[in-house]
Amino acid sequence: MVTVADIHTIDRLAAVVKRARVETGLTQADLAKLAGVSRQFVIEVEAGHPRAEIAKVFQVLGALGRTAQVSQPDVAGTPRPVRRDRKFFVSLALHRAVLGRLRADPNEVVRRGIAGLEARRAHARGSAVAMLDDWHRVLLGPDFRALEALLTADDEYSVEMRNLTPFIDVLSDTERQAALDQVFDERRWEQ
């Protein structure tokens, strides 16, 4: 499941970055190397230094398998809910099946995901390019927790990312049909 953290201050961002680094078992030096920034920069971000360059902050977040998300709250002040229609449940079921394959054969699924990513990248334009870059970072990340979250979470970002899935060739026809049969048997979008 994706953990969403509301970030209203630099101190809150600092806490999120530090917690994510500690949870992934990285040292500040490891994170700096992975993100392509200096160790001093990681120290400053974790300390809530107000002059941290935003581009480098995104590099650090990306290295941790995290993203920043901007949402427009509705009138009540809560983020807009994800529309749980037939497309949502079909995509979720197919990606849960991909997750099953990932757990059984991670190297093959990542290999096929990268191949699918490259095929999509040849035709991508605009925001799709950035989303494919996000998929690339997650596929090559240090562990599969971020990838598992994108495959199964119901937050707006994960749903959008699944719409641009690189896992076109991962499931066999039989696996794909089994996932679809289950979705259409349950018909949860009608509930």
Image (spheres, rainbow, N blue to C red):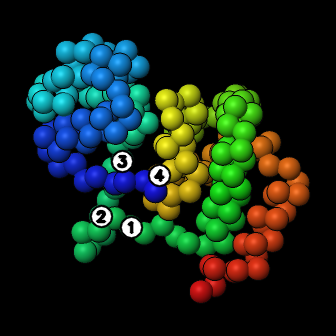
Residue position for label 4: 157
Whether label 1 touches label 2, CB < 8 Å? yes
Residue type, mark 1 in image = Arg
Q: CA distance from mark 3 to mark 4?
A: 7 Å
Precedes in sequence: disc 4 or disc 1: 1
Q: Which mark is residue 89?
A: none
Horizontal and vertical percent position of residue 65: 43, 36
Q: CA distance from mark 3 to mark 2?
A: 12 Å
Task: Quarter of the image for the C terminus: give it.
Answer: bottom right
Give the farthest residue toward the right. 174
Mark yes or no: residue 99 visible. Answer: yes
Q: Closer to the camera, 16 or 133?
A: 16
Precedes in sequence: disc 1 or disc 2: 2
Give the farthest residue toward the bottom. 191
Horizontal and vertical percent position of residue 62: 41, 31
Residue position for label 3: 69
Mark 2 neighbour density, 10 Å: few (under 14) some (14–19) many (20 or more): few
x 52%, y 70%: residue: 83
Q: Identify the element where label 1 is drawn.
A: loop
x 32%, y 59%: residue: 72
